[in-house]
Every structure is written in C-alpha cells, then in structure tokens.
Amino acid sequence: MIATNYLIVGSGVAGLTFAIKIAERFPDRKITIITKSNEDESNTKYAQGGIAIVTDETEDSYQKHIDDTLICGDGLCDVDVVKMVVTEGPKRLKELIAWGAKFDKTVKGNFDLGKEGGHSRNRVVHHKDQTGYEIERAILEQVHQKENITVLNHYFALDLITQNNHCFGAYALHEKTNEIIPFQSDFTVLATGGIGHLYGHTTNPVIATGDGIAMAFRANAAIKDMEFIQFHPTALYDASAGSKFLISEAVRGFGAYMRTQKGLRFMINYDERGELASRDIVSQSIDLELKKSGDDCVYLDCTHLDLDAFIKHFPMIYERCKSIGIDIAKDWIPVVPAQHYLCGGITVDKNGKTSIENLFACGECSRTGLHGANRLASNSLLEALVYSEKIYDYLADVSIEKSQFNGIISNWESAEKPKISPDYLAKMKVQLQLLMRQNAGIVRNELDLPKAKEQLLHWKNEMEEVSKTHQISVALYELLNMITIGNLIVQQSIDRKDNRGGFMKV
Ligand code: FAD
Ligand code: SIN
C-alpha cells in the first residue's frame, strides 16, 4: 500500500499542471502521479495547432471566442462554462510562459496567431507545429523541481477504490514487476486523456484507451456526451491501422485548399466558410465525398502557399511529408478523417468534481460542458489548463480529513492464474476497432448501432470472464476498458435522437 495526499492518474497537461500548483500550495503534502507509459507520453505531447486564447483585444474579443465556441458546439455547450474558460485563457497562458513554455512571436513581438476551423479570428497561440511537445517539456521540468511530487512511470491504474460513493484512491499494476499496488489517497484526480485506440484509425498515441472513463464508470460515476466523437478531417492518409500523423488544421488556416482527387475544391459546396468550417462539418463532408467517389482519400493543396513561411510555421509537417516523398511545394497531401478527440467523458462541475466524493477529473477524460456537440479547435489544451486551476482553487481551501474508509483497504486478490494469450487479445482489439469504425463512425445508423450493442455486450461478458480467470495485464485491462467505452458510445448514440455537431445518425 502506498499512501499519498493527492493521487493523480496521468501525466499530460491536465495532470501535471494540477500537480505543480497543489505541490506549491502544500509543500508538506505528498503528491503522487502514476502514468502508464513514459512520463511524457500523452495526447498532449502531440498537440500541433496550439491553444485558442484571446491575446489581442483590438482584433479579437472574448465575446467572439465565446460565440465561435458556442456555434461549434451546436447548441449543446454550457454557456457559463464557455464564458469561464474563454476569459481565463490569458492568465493560464501567462502561467505557462512563467513555467518556461515558449510560443512563437511576430517580428513586432506579438504572439504569432494561427487560425483553425470554426474560428472567426486568428487566435491560436503556438510553438511552431509542436505546441504540445513544448508545453509537456516545460511542465515536466517544473514537476521535476518539486520535492513533494513523485512520478511513477509504467504504473497502470486498474480501478478506483471506493466506498459509499467516496473515492479513496486506486489500484495500479506496476508493469515491470506485475505487482498490483493499492494507492490510498485523500483526493484523486483522473487525467487519463482520450480514447482514440478504440477506433484504431486515430491521431492519438497508443496510450489513449479510455481507461479513466471506464474506471469511473465501473465506480458508478456519471458519464455524459459519449456520442460526440470528434474526427479530425486531415490525418495523413495511410492504409494501415494504428496512429495516424496529423496535418494540423492550422495548415488550412494558413490557406491550404481541400481538393478531391479530380481537383475540385469541394468544401465551398458544404459551408460558406469553405475549408475553415468547423471540424465536424469538414469531416462529414469528406466522408460524403469519399462515399460518392469511391476514392480512398482527399487532398490538401499547399502548392500556392509561401514555402518559406510554411516551413517556419510547420517544420515537422513539412519534414514528415518530405520523408514519404511528398514535396508540398508541388504535391498535394493525401488526407482522411480519423478519430481525434472525445467531447464527452466523466461529468464534472465547475470545480472539476465528479459525482463521486473526493474524485476529480480533468482534461480530455472529463465532460465539462465546454464543447457541447463538437469541440472548437485548440480549445482542449485551454480547457485542461483552466480546469486544473479550478480543481486546485477548490482544493486549496479544503482540509484533509481522517480517512472515512470503513475497514482496511484490501490487497487485490492475486492468486496464481494463467497468462492470457497476447494473440487472442490482439485479434479481439482489431475486431473491436473495426466494429467501432464501421458501426459508430462519422455517420451512424439505426440498424448498425443495435448490432454493435449486441456484439459489445457479448465481448464484455467474455472479457469479464477472461479477466477473472487470467493474470491481469495492461493489454487485458485496456481491452476491457475499450469495450466499456464502446458500449457507452453506442448506447448514448442510440439514445440521442437529434443530429448535432459531430453526431450524425441517418
Ligand atoms: P493526455 O495528454 O492524453 O494525458 C493522459 C495521461 O494519462 C497520459 O500520461 C497517459 O499515459 C495516462 N494514462 C491513461 N490511462 C492511464 C492508466 N490506466 N494508468 C495510468 N496512466 C494512464 N488540442 C488543442 O487544444 N490544441 C491542439 O493543437 C491539439 N492538437 C492535437 C494533436 C494531436 C495529434 C492530438 C492527438 C491531440 C491534439 N489536441 C489538441 C488535443 C489535446 O492534445 C488533448 O485533448 C489534451 O492534450 C489532453 O490532455 P490530458 O492531460 O487530458 O490527456
Ligand atoms: C490541429 O492542430 O489540427 C489540432 C488542433 C486541435 O485538436 O484542437
């Protein structure tokens, strides 16, 4: 058993920024971060476009950012939350800069603001096309300087420890020793990120398997808006499954055109904003175009853009394309939509509190009400920064009470059990990803969703049996978690009767 005051599950922007703040506020309290891979591995690390923040009130305004967020969310955002998040942006940016994160500036010394789909103004603060990498670097450096923070890499959180709707920590599997350790904590924060690998074709790294949401669901926490899966319109086309390289939406903000294989700039037929319509509309339009043409992908045409300026803003994208023989000065970039982000998740209030006492959720695994039916580009890093502050703010004044756990937190039952075949798990994962892509993708229908529900229920029962009779492993739990998330997405898609934002049922 490891006892800690604050247990944080996840080391992306949400978990790390909360850790820094609470560690500074309470130097005598113990903060433990457990993370399932290397400490920097996260969706955060791959964020490209940047953070949407109003920094120039002559050209932009909070109201415009609020309006853009609300339009994008298609009537389902919580207006108070939107106002709160947008107006706190500048403070959170200042903090990141104070922690050492660097953002691009113009020759005049102002922020070099990018533009993305759904934004009526240039307002995306960025570090080239590697904003997430830069943020993760800076905040990890801060975390390492705090003596009261311990980061435990390769600890996989399995389940929450709860009693009478109170959270007392979590069980985690130490991946190197296979030991299952109970972490007893006064406060627990889930910051476990996204779900991308449930779909296979995704911009997310392999850690994105929805673990935190599945754990919270098993503990009876409220989970909402799971039907609002965001598909990014422009993942680099590649026929194989697995993580896809993203071509940032900021490339379209920079002036790139979208074309069909025949060269048609089709977006103008779907939305007057053309290429800069919001992500849901662009992805749905590409899906329709591909179904019409039978082509495998559409294209981003950058051939008319200023090459030097492009390379300065997007060095990583330029190099990646070059490495696979695409010269963006001459060639179009083949792209397809891919799963990118989950707008729903663990329901939290404005303090980041879940429906379980002493359990908080922050970042992509949470559902705050900011995104509604579709997240506005570059609002995710912002949301994580604002909500880690809200959780901190709330907990900064909450005293630690003696644990009300009735009895002793037991060890995980650990009798010798056989190992499950990795091939069986891998095969099952491929089947699950295919099912989700086919039955719960960009466009869903009344026929396929119930079929998916039945299959998922069958797999759930099968996997629950397998997990009782076999040794616990990361792969086994990830699969179990992804099936749980699949069930939530499918059920909530069946329940939703109206098409909104990223949700389309025909
Ligand atoms: P993450 O950064 O994903 O961190 C989750 C952490 O939890 C990881 O450390 C993971 O290992 C850990 N974890 C998960 N499960 C467990 C478990 N069972 N046990 C222990 N640890 C666990 N958003 C923007 O606003 N602007 C952008 O420009 C942008 N670009 C993006 C580009 C790409 C390619 C991707 C994938 C996303 C992008 N996003 C962007 C979205 C944004 O990056 C994420 O939503 C955000 O970083 C999520 O932060 P987080 O801290 O909630 O989760
Ligand atoms: C991108 O750079 O296109 C991703 C931005 C985001 O997910 O908000």
Image: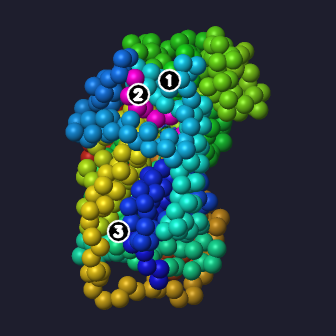
Residue 487 in sight: no
Query: Residue at 56% across / 48% down in the picture?
Result: 138
User: Mark 1 touching mark 2, by CB under 8 A?
Assistant: yes
Q: How far apart are marks 1 and 2 (CA)?
A: 9 Å
Q: Name the residue under label 1.
A: 110
Query: What residue type is disc 2 on?
Result: Thr
Determine if the magenta segment contains residue 448: no
Query: What residue type is disc 1 on?
Result: Asn
User: Residue 385: x percent and y percent?
Assistant: 41, 46
Q: Dividing the picture into quarters, in which one does residue 167 lie?
A: bottom left
Q: Distance between the residues labelled 3 and 1?
A: 40 Å
Which mark identifies residue 187? Answer: 3
Q: Is mark 2 within 8 Å of ligand 1?
A: no
Magenta residues span: 46-56
Left or right for 302, reference 181: right
Q: Does the residue labelled 3 lie within 8 Å of ligand 1?
A: no
